[in-house]
Image (cartoon, grey):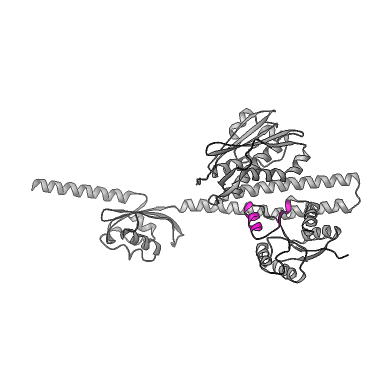
């Protein structure tokens, strides 16, 4: 009798401890039995579901469904789990409309012996940050796009003007200066557009079969005018005739464009850039070696930071966005790859990008 | 001698004017539409030798115009050059999959380079 009483006391104490534990949790918890009646719950769960006026004691031993009747998806998911047609329940985002503003919840449900454990987490702050980042990226994208049109207009008008009008030497010089400035602005806008795509496109990877050799050749053919202007020798050598990979073509192109454009930008007139491609077991490595200005030792750790321009780069060329290598790095990580470099100031740099031959998505 | 007719579907007045002048000087007759719907109507009526087609257009976007051109017996064989500010690989692929003959990102091309392409494709 004595032992029985002691055991009962012990059980009551453990029970009270567990109830206090559940009540103190910062996330919402509801435990229901196989019929859907509430065994344990905390006030946080009720508040998150928009039922702050209901107290926990009012729902114990009562069915959960009348409480959540207007949250159809949750009701449906719980019922399916209880019927054991699922091994778990996961709602990555559920929007609850409340008087003081919408709330976003992530909900996990796990069947347990004769019931189910439901765990609710408030992810509103995460969604707000993502929304702000998306809006910022959309703004940059729109602004960049809108800027391209008037810039192209200026370019074409200058082209027609040069062709049609009799110009003095000075006049031709001024028009060349305008053209040069417009080209620089266009490049900056293109960089900003790339940046916004990279930063906004976190979930936007589309995997398809891509011929990397062909993609690089295509990009190199587009930059021939720029190559000729700086009298650069750009050689694509040591590559497989056809390197097929499963990847996102746009993101891969961003990497190729950023690395090679960076090499062109910081290699002087008459310099050399060698592009090569090699296959490893289940990866491939893109290598871009230039005879450019290199990167000072003290600044190498910061090379991939956004808006970072090395001190010698600023002296070499006063304007520049400092986002090319940042884009290359972000794009490389998005494809599950690695990027690194060797460099010697005043001698040149070699950038390496290693990517998997077949994509496993890198979620950020 | 009859001039080769080019249809230009471009909503930006300055870009259209520059292209119009450059093409006319190169010996082409240029028809112009400011929006996709009118562009499609002119294409069906005039059957030009080549169409320069912007993508971001009022009323009907360039991709939809291209699709409609390729579905119409009278216009499906007309070469179409998409002439646009949209430069992503995805947009390019969409354009080619809909039947575009070429894809030009306006900000990367000089007028004379565009005319070169038009000359090449309109005589094929």
Q: Is residue A71 visible?
A: no
| Residue B51 horizontal/vertical position (percent) | 75, 62
In this picture, residue A235 sits left or right of residue A157: left
B85 and B95: which is toward the camera: B95
**Who's the residue at 53% across and 44% down the image?**
A358
Q: Which residues are magenta?
A: B82-107
**Who's the residue at 79% across and 47% down the image?**
A179
Residue B63 lies within the magenta run: no
In this picture, residue A191 sits left or right of residue B12: left
Q: Is residue B92 visible?
A: yes
Based on the displayed image, in which of its 4 quarters is residue A324 positioned? top right
A3 and B21: which is toward the camera: B21
Q: Name, please, the residue furthest toward the left.
A: A1
| Residue A160 horizontal/vertical position (percent) | 84, 54
A282, above or below B88, in the image = above
| Residue A262 horizontal/vertical position (percent) | 67, 39
């Amino acid at each position: 009798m004595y032992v029985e009483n002691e055991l009962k006391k012990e059980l009551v104490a453990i029970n009270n401890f567990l109830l206090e534990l559940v009540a103190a949790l910062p996330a919402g918890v509801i435990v229901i039995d196989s019929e859907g009646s509430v065994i344990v719950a905390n006030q946080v769960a009720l508040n998150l579901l928009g039922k702050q006026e209901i107290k926990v004691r009012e729902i114990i031993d009562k069915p959960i469904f009348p409480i959540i009747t207007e949250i159809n998806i949750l009701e449906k998911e719980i019922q399916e789990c209880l019927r054991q047609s699922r091994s778990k329940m996961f709602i990555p985002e559920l929007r609850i409309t409340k008087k003081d503003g919408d709330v976003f919840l992530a909900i996990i449900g796990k069947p347990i012996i004769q019931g189910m454990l439901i765990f609710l987490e408030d992810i509103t702050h995460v969604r707000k940050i993502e929304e702000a980042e998306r809006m910022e990226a959309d703004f940059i994208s729109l602004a960049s796009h809108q800027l391209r049109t008037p810039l192209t207009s200026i370019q074409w008008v200058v082209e027609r003007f040069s062709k049609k009008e009799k110009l003095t030497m000075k006049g031709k010089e001024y028009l060349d200066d305008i053209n040069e400035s417009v080209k620089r602005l266009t490049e900056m806008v293109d960089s900003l557009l790339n940046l916004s795509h990279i930063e906004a496109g976190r979930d936007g990877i589309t995997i398809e079969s891509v011929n990397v050799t062909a993609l690089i050749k295509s990009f190199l053919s587009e930059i021939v005018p720029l190559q000729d202007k700086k009298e650069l020798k750009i050689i694509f050598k040591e590559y497989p005739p056809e390197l097929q990979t499963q990847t996102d073509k746009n993101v891969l192109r961003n990497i190729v464009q950023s690395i090679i454009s960076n090499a062109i930008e910081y290699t002087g007139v008459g310099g050399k850039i060698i592009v090569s491609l090699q296959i490893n077991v289940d990866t491939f490595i893109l290598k871009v070696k230039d005879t450019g200005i290199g990167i000072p030792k003290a600044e190498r750790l910061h090379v991939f930071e956004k808006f970072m321009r090395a001190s010698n780069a600023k002296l070499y060329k006063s304007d520049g966005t400092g986002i090319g290598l940042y884009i290359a790095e972000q794009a490389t990580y998005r494809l599950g790859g690695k990027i690194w470099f060797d460099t010697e100031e005043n001698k040149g740099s070699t950038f390496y990008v290693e990517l998997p031959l077949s994509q496993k998505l890198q979620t950020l | 001698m009859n001039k080769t007719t080019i249809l230009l579907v471009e909503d930006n007045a300055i870009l259209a004017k520059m292209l119009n002048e450059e093409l006319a000087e190169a010996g082409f007759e240029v028809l112009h539409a400011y929006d996709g719907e009118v562009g499609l109507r002119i294409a069906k009526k005039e059957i030009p030798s080549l169409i320069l087609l912007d993508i971001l257009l009022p009323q009907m976007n360039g991709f939809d115009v291209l699709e409609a051109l390729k579905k119409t017996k009278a216009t499906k064989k007309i070469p179409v050059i998409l002439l646009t500010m949209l430069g992503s690989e995805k947009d390019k692929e969409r354009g080619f999959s809909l039947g575009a003959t070429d894809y030009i990102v306006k900000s990367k091309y000089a007028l004379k380079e565009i005319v070169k392409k038009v000359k090449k494709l309109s005589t094929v």
